[in-house]
Image: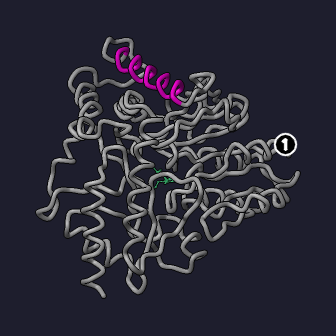
Amino acid sequence: KLAVDVEKIRKDFPILQREVNGYPLVYFDNAATSQTPQQVMDVIVDYYSNYNANIHRGVHSLSQEATDKYEAARKTIQKHFNAEKSYEIILTSGTTHGINLVASGFASLLKEGDEILVSALEHHSNIVPWQMICEKSGAKLKVIPMNEDGEIVYSEFENLLTEKTQIVFLNHVSNALGTVNPIKKIIDKAHSKGAAVLIDGAQAAPHIKADVQELDVDFYVASAHKMCGPTGVGMLYGKEEWLKKLPPYQGGGEMIATVTFEKTTYADLPHKFEAGTPNICGGIAFGAALDYMNAIGFDEIAAYEQELLKYATEELLKIEGVKLYGIAKEKTSVISFNIEGLHPYDIGTIVDKLGIAVRTGHHCAQPIMDFYKIPGTVRASFSFYNTKAEIDSFIEAVKKAKMMLS
Ligand code: PMP
């Protein structure tokens, strides 16, 4: 028996019924963005049909309704990630926004001689904001290396971590390889030296329910669009003490207590970090997406996706010349591969002609590609609404691509 009722689930996703280039769509680009169930679309339509209004300001009924629903979504997010307080959840435009918010705040805390630690497995969005902050503050960026299997070298992390380290930032799961990093161990070790930790949960959140209190993490960020929600919205969890310590990221409406030309005082959390009109509908839909996934169950989702991963890995390895990248012991449902002598882009183009959506390229993780000395990979990433039959179609398509290109 399957861990999830995939046939029933598929009916919730209208897009899975469509054809691409005359073939049934096989959507294996879930690590880039996930598809949206009807239940979440209904919430979006309901918002614009019935209570579209700006929040937090109006006394009128619609504004009150929108505010209540938006704050209810914040509570859903709080509960999902098990934050202690709802105001420790900042609604952002996505993971990138959350990281930039924290990095920019750290610019005012870091000084010349301080060090910050990143892993070699990062998405560009967890590298570049910190490089910009190093330029401003004079802090030094150090890199925890990776090994051939696509794992962080933990012993090197221990060597690099010193009293000078102010913050360690890495992903919970690598988007390019699917590696699950030992974040609990890293957080505890970093804290033992007094360093803060930011975890980029963009790729973990669709598969693993993170408990921020149990992890004792200082910051955790994710994007709604990778977990059945819309684009342009995401979350930043920050421990209260940290969110109080960091300066506001953007100035504007909503984030103030009082404004005069002489001096402005800032609003309390979470509004201090939520300048301007937010993505109100998106936030509400994010809450609905979490409700949808929780109704299926994260344990069930993970168990099913691991079955898909195992099956696809076995089938893919039967094709001669296939090389997998990232064979960590603990992985989410992501397969990154190449075929000897072929360019990933060409494989991606041919399988697309057969209706199959995969990602090709460096996956915004050029340092990983440099490590393997390759221009990129083909990445197939599975969600709980994918099937073994779709994997069969994918394998056939890869074989066809290989034949045509060889
Ligand atoms: N970090 C990781 C690990 C990701 O996979 C992504 C999205 N590909 C991001 C950060 C950036 O997320 P977003 O584009 O939603 O801000």
Q: Residue at x 41, y 16 (%)?
A: 68
Of residues 331 and 160, the one nearer the viewer is 331
Q: Is residue 179 left or right of residue 241?
A: left
Span shown in magenta: 64-80
Q: Position of residue 318 (x, y in %)?
A: 38, 72
> Circle 1 sits on which residue?
192
Q: Is residue 214 magenta?
A: no
Q: Is residue 267 above or below residue 391?
A: above
Q: How many marks?
A: 1
Q: Residue at x 44, y 62 (%)?
A: 335
Q: Residues within 10 Å of mark 1 (few under 14, many from 20)?
A: few
Q: Which quadrant is home to the C terminus?
A: bottom left
Q: Residue at x 73, y 34 (%)?
A: 245
Q: Is residue 127 left or right of residue 186?
A: left
Give, as a three-letter code, the residue at label 1: Ser
Q: Position of residue 295 (x, y in %)?
A: 38, 27
**Residue 83 in which image quadrant:** top right
